[in-house]
Image: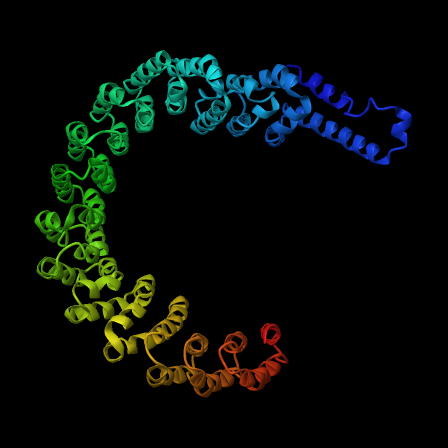
Amino acid sequence: MDVESMAKGVSEREPAGMEVDTQAFSHSQVEGEENEEQKNDAVLVSVLIDDLQNDDVQFRLNSMRKLGTIAKALGPDRTIKELVPYLSEFVDDEDDILVVLSDQLGGLHEFVGGAHQAHVLLVPLETLSGIEESVVREKAVESIKKIMKVLNKEQLREHAVPLVRRLGTGKWFTSRVSSSSLFELLYPHLEQKSQDEMRALFTRLCEDETPMVRRAACQQLGNFASVVDYKHVVSELLPSMAKLTQDAQDSVRLRTVENCVLIAKCLNDQDRQSKILPMIYALCKDKSWRVRYMVADKFCDLTKAAGKEGKNRAEMVNIFVQLLQDGEAEVRTAAAQKIADVAGLIGKELTTEKLMKPTEALAKDDCQYTRAALASVIMALANCASKEVALEFLLPQFLQLLKDDDPEVRLNVISKLDTVNDVIGIQLLSQSLLPAIDELARDKKWRIRLAILKHIPILATKLGPDLFKQKLCGQCMEWLRDSVYQIRIAAAENLKNVAKSFDSKWVSANFIPEVKRLADSKKPSHRMSAIYAIKYLSEVVEQKLCKDELLPLAVNLSRDKVANLRFTVAKTFQTMSGFIDQSVAANEIRSCLESLAQDPDQDVVYFAKEALECM
């Protein structure tokens, strides 16, 4: 196509309405403005068309993103005859350009005359589907699917079937890879003869000599099976899948795991047991640890797909036990993460009979990541067993994990304490639990200290006020002096969350004295912690405690020699004003804020005035 003539043709096109009588037109300002706007649009489109051949990639890219505007200006006929053929020759450009082109073509069907002409867009998309760059191919396939969705059955038979046939038998593997994604959408709309051809072609793709093609076909096999009738799934697709589970490439076998889930949903119990379970069993013993890892990761879905029949469930449990005892740590870790979910599916009887012994071995596993995975689910696993079994088998493992050398393992155990009372009871664990918490609270890694700090409010509800005061109250206050800022702020907020579990009298006796000591400290970081503690506690304690204890501390700190502390007090006053008697807020708080508004530091002035405006 001659781009210059197309651009010239657009710029010289008479805008709609130009055939109106000139004299009448001259008396219509509105029509004149519309006419001028149309001329400007024509010039813009002309520039966009010229930019399609610009040497600068960015210009071509911007123009390509406006293909809809260009096509609309050209009209359906010229788009079909000139623009689409030109775009079909555009395949040697930069990959970024081709990605945009592939994406834009999928939305042009409304500019080529609607659905009855949309098939013309398949021509450039077919070429783009064979490009070496995978991102371009994926966008092209997405656009082909968009076009196919607007075509009727006759158009699909006439244009889409030959397209898939050419792609599926193409010389280059890239075309065959792209074709595998189109069968699912096309197949239901075809007659019997064409369906037979499509199944045969898909089967050939599953046996293609190129691993990338087999991998792509394998990835689509489960979805394709969902639209194929039952007898052909069993007679044609399952044999292909069985071969893929034995493929020489682990990247192909890897994708058969998901197919087992999808195809099992299409089968009856008898075929699941005779066809799918042997495949799962073979994949569980696969020589590649990546394949076995995928089986472990998808095991709950596989168990559901295998059906609820007792024999099937028992076979699946045996397979899972093998994964828990796998020679590769990555596989054991993936299986350990699923152990509670699997236990929930198989029931208490099978859980007790099959999973307790492997779990005991996992608690002593050499790999810290495996132990950490078990630690994160052991409490949930206890919920799937009777209390007697939990105390006999899981309590010793729980206590052992609490004493683990790796802090991540201990932290994972403690992070699940919200379920501990439902299973074992906090009193049985307190002797081992509290020393582990104390050790984690002093860990060298500040992120570990932060993580354990965030679980303290749960412990407060479990331990009760007396035991909490005895064992953890001191540590809560010690965190306010931590060398890491994030820890100190989290510790102040932690006081608020703990205070929600106890009454104001308990807070006054145990938290306020320490906050006063921090407020009198010579270290600015300690005084800052006191300010944040005042701010958070004021949100949950009784008004009387806030007025009598917290407000005087804040007033004293508003005179601190450090400007950062003074403007933090101003922000704290803004918070406190919403939780304290308004007459007090109007007197003491406003008086302090007005004083701070005259502060020599500009930041202090800003936050003081902001707080005053909010009162």
The scheme the figure's colours follow is rainbow
Q: Quadrant of residue 47?
A: top right
Q: Quadrant of residue 471?
A: bottom left
The quadrant in which the C terminus is found is: bottom right
State left or right for residue 227 relative to residue 342.
right
Would residue 12 be seen by someone viewing this image from the given angle?
yes
- Residue 212, placed above or below residue 550: above
Q: Which of 327 and 139 is in front in this view?
A: 139
Residue at image location 18% in from the left, 40% down from the top: 308
* Residue 354 position within the rendered picture, expressed as x and y whole percent measured from the top left: 10, 47
State left or right for residue 601 relative to residue 18.
left
Residue at image location 20% in from the left, 25% down from the top: 246
Q: In which quarter of the image is residue 503?
A: bottom left
Q: How many marks?
A: 0
* Residue 269 position within the rendered picture, expressed as x and y whole percent measured from the top left: 18, 32
The quadrant in which the N terminus is found is: top right
* Residue 508 position within the rendered picture, expressed as x and y whole percent measured from the top left: 36, 84
Q: Nearer the viewer, residue 354 or 176?
A: 354
Q: Nearer the viewer, residue 242 or 226?
A: 226
Would residue 414 be seen by someone viewing this image from the given angle?
no
- Residue 140, placed above or below residue 464: above
- Residue 563, placed above or below residue 341: below
* Residue 604 position within the rendered picture, expressed as x and y whole percent measured from the top left: 58, 75
